[in-house]
Image: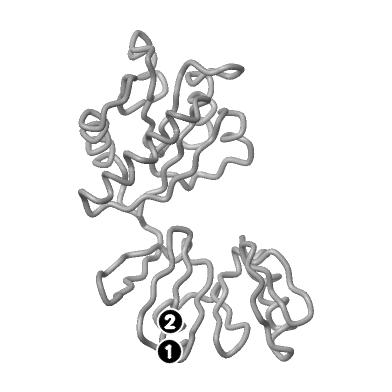
Amino acid sequence: MKKVAIIDDDENIRSTIKEYLKKYEQASKEQFIVSDFAFPELFLTNYKPEYDIVMMDIDMPGMNGLTAARKLRDLDERVVLLFVTNLAQYALKGYEVAATDFIVKPLKYERFSQKLARALKFVPESTRPMLMIRTESATITVELDDIIYVEVNKHDVYYHTVKDVYRVRGSLKQAEEDLGDPKFFACDKSCLVNLAYVEGVSAGTVTVAGNDLCVSRSKKKPLIDALAAFHNRK
């Protein structure tokens, strides 16, 4: 699963790229988690090197794409950079910021897919821990960091990820063993939460990425202690 950031002040362009990425998913084995930004300043604020591909316009109000790309390279030398622009004359300058390629506007899916396929070859293999989830219809590989929480209803286990919700047959104990990571905490008999997504703990409730989940009375203090230990390790 690849993480893609789109930076373009034109909302129509951002929508088109997201549409093309979905179309590419359907035609390939790739899966994308997509974030989009109207301005590079929004993208660069509190930037974390978690993206695999960045697709950026050049001609934008305020900070232009080349300036933003230089700042990006100060923060992340690894990420694959694609310029999506109608300013083809800036192609040579793109190499100054290690841009992998240019996609020239107006966008056409065939050309876009060719450029994307090439860019994907430059994405390094993920070293982040993965989990293989076998649903009734498919087998999906998900990074542990992308799993927000896991809940059990009878004999069904639901993996809530940043991309989608996946249902498999099983138990919470089996899910906990499969995950094998201390950042997943059992807050009651039916739910595991990823401590990285916990936003708050109150009486009987833990808020995880905007979702209010139950936490048993006996688990509240251990959960708070686990949160403190987790953030101290970061």
Q: Residues within 10 Å of mark 1 (few under 14, many from 20)?
A: some
Quarter of the view holding residue 131: bottom left
Which amino acid is tagged 1?
Answer: Ser
Q: Is residue 154 above or below residue 69?
A: below
Q: Earlier in the sequence, mark 1 or mark 2?
A: 2
In which image quadrant can residue 92 be found?
top left
**How far across and down, in percent of the image, does residue 101 sit?**
30, 25
Which element carries disc 1, helix, strand or loop?
loop
In whole angstroms, how far apart are the C-alphas of marks 1 and 2?
6 Å
Whether the residues at callouts 1 and 2 have beta carbons within 8 Å, the answer is yes
Label 2 neighbour load within 10 Å: few <14, some 14-19, many 20+? many
Dot 2 lies on which element? strand
- Does residue 182 appear to the left or right of 54 in the view shown? right
Residue that numbered label 2 is attached to: 157
In the depicted view, which residue is nearer to us: 18 or 6?
18
What residue is at 54 percent from the left and 75 percent from the top? 184
**Could you tell me the amino acid type at mark 2?**
Val
Q: Residue at x 61, y 87 (%)?
A: 188
Q: Nearer the viewer, residue 106 or 207?
A: 106
Residue carrying label 1: 171
29 is higher (above) or lower (below) than 7: below
